[in-house]
Amino acid sequence: MAEAGEKLPISEFYKVVNYVTIFKSEKWWEAIVVFESFGRRSIGLYLWQNRNGAWKRKHKFNVRNLEEWNKLKGAIEQLSSKLVSK
């Protein structure tokens, strides 16, 4: 969950509903974020890089609805066994 006093480096355009940090080091920060824009919620998978003391977005991937999530989840589950090298 969100850490006390910690603000995500996301545009003020988006209203952050909640987030979970997956990984954070001095140089990289990866988080899953529920955000709202134009009254619609999405889930964003973010990766930021710390450059000269400022967090800059490196990657962003959005999941816009449950149908899209189910397609992604199915594809990941189908391919996950390939993570183990033989």
Image (cartoon, grey):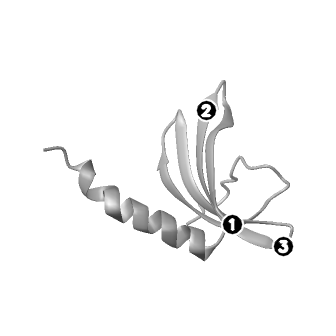
- Residue 85 vs residue 26: left or right? left
Few, some or many residues within 10 Å of mark 3 (<14, 14–19, 20+): few
User: Which structural element holds mark 1?
Assistant: strand
Q: What residue lies at 58% left-to-right and 74% top-to-bottom?
A: 67
Distance from label 3 to label 2 (Cα)? 30 Å
- Residue 79 vs residue 63: left or right? left
Q: Earlier in the sequence, mark 3 or mark 2?
A: 3
Q: List x then y, in percent, for residue 1.
A: 55, 66
Q: What residue lies at 39% left-to-right and 60% top-to-bottom?
A: 76
Task: Give the residue at the far top of this rendering.
Answer: 52
The kind of residue on which mark 1 rests is Ser
The kind of residue on which mark 3 rests is Gly
The kind of residue on which mark 2 rests is Asn
Which mark lies nearer to you, 3 or 2? 3
Few, some or many residues within 10 Å of mark 2 (<14, 14–19, 20+): some
Give the residue at mark 1.
42
User: Which structural element holds mark 3?
Assistant: loop
Q: Quadrant of the C terminus?
A: top left
Distance from label 3 to label 1 (Cα)? 10 Å
For the residue pair 36 and 50, the one nearer the viewer reads as 36
Q: Are marks 3 and 2 in contact (CB under 8 Å)?
A: no
Residue 44's quadrant in the figure? bottom right
Give the residue at mark 2.
50
Few, some or many residues within 10 Å of mark 1 (<14, 14–19, 20+): some
User: Which structural element holds mark 2?
Assistant: strand
Q: Earlier in the sequence, mark 1 or mark 2?
A: 1
Q: Are marks 1 and 2 in contact (CB under 8 Å)?
A: no
Q: Which mark is residue 39?
A: 3
